[in-house]
Amino acid sequence: MAYSKNYRLFTARLLCLALILFHLVYYAVFPLEKGIMLSLIYVFFSLAYKKNMILLQTIRQSHMIVMVLAFTAIVLSFIPHLLSVAVTLAFILEAACCFPSKVKHRKGKLKKPMRNLPILNK
């Protein structure tokens, strides 16, 4: 089930819903926050579920992108008026790390240990 396209679309939709709820609550608490406008760009982008799914797969496949986004989220959380952008990046990272892959990774057969090794026989 986790490898189906519908499950991946569900994960992208769940990310969009969580971001919309976060932005509604955040705007209710801090209505004059300027940084929320930056993170709303991604919220509108996330409404296009298939493109968001491609973005999440790209982030999931590259460890370098994950590290850069994580470092950026940490730095932005200490800059005034950019907490909403940092939380949006954190949501994206969490969804990308939990995002299911397209193919099922199968474990290879283990090789049988070689029993007749010429080890110092005494």
Image (cartoon, rainbow, N blue to C red):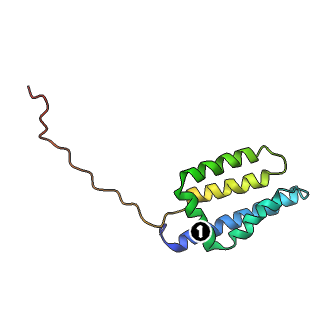
In the figure, is residue 89 to the left or right of 83? left
Please name whichever residue, 97 or 62, is drawn nearer the observer in this view of the structure: 62
Q: Residue at x 49, y 72 (%)?
A: 4
Answer with the quarter of the image where residue 46 lies.
bottom right
Please name whichever residue, 16 or 44, is drawn nearer the observer in this view of the structure: 44
Q: Which residue is mark 1?
A: 53
- Most extreme residue toward the left is 122
Q: Residue at x 76, y 46 (%)?
A: 77
**Which three-letter amino acid code belongs to the residue tagged 1?**
Met
- Most extreme residue toward the top is 122
Q: Residue at x 72, y 62 (%)?
A: 19
Query: Secondary structure beneath disc 1?
Result: helix
Please name whichever residue, 72 or 120, is drawn nearer the observer in this view of the structure: 72
Residue 48 horizontal/vertical position (percent): 67, 74
Number of labels in the image equals: 1
The relative height of residue 120 versus residue 14 in the rendered view (above or below) is above
Answer with the quarter of the image where residue 104 lies.
bottom left
Answer with the quarter of the image where residue 51 lies.
bottom right
Binning the other alpha carbons within 10 Å of mark 1 as few (below 14), some (14 to 19) or many (20 upward) gives: many
In the figure, is residue 77 to the left or right of 105? right
Residue 17 horizontal/vertical position (percent): 70, 67
In the figure, is residue 48 to the left or right of 61? right
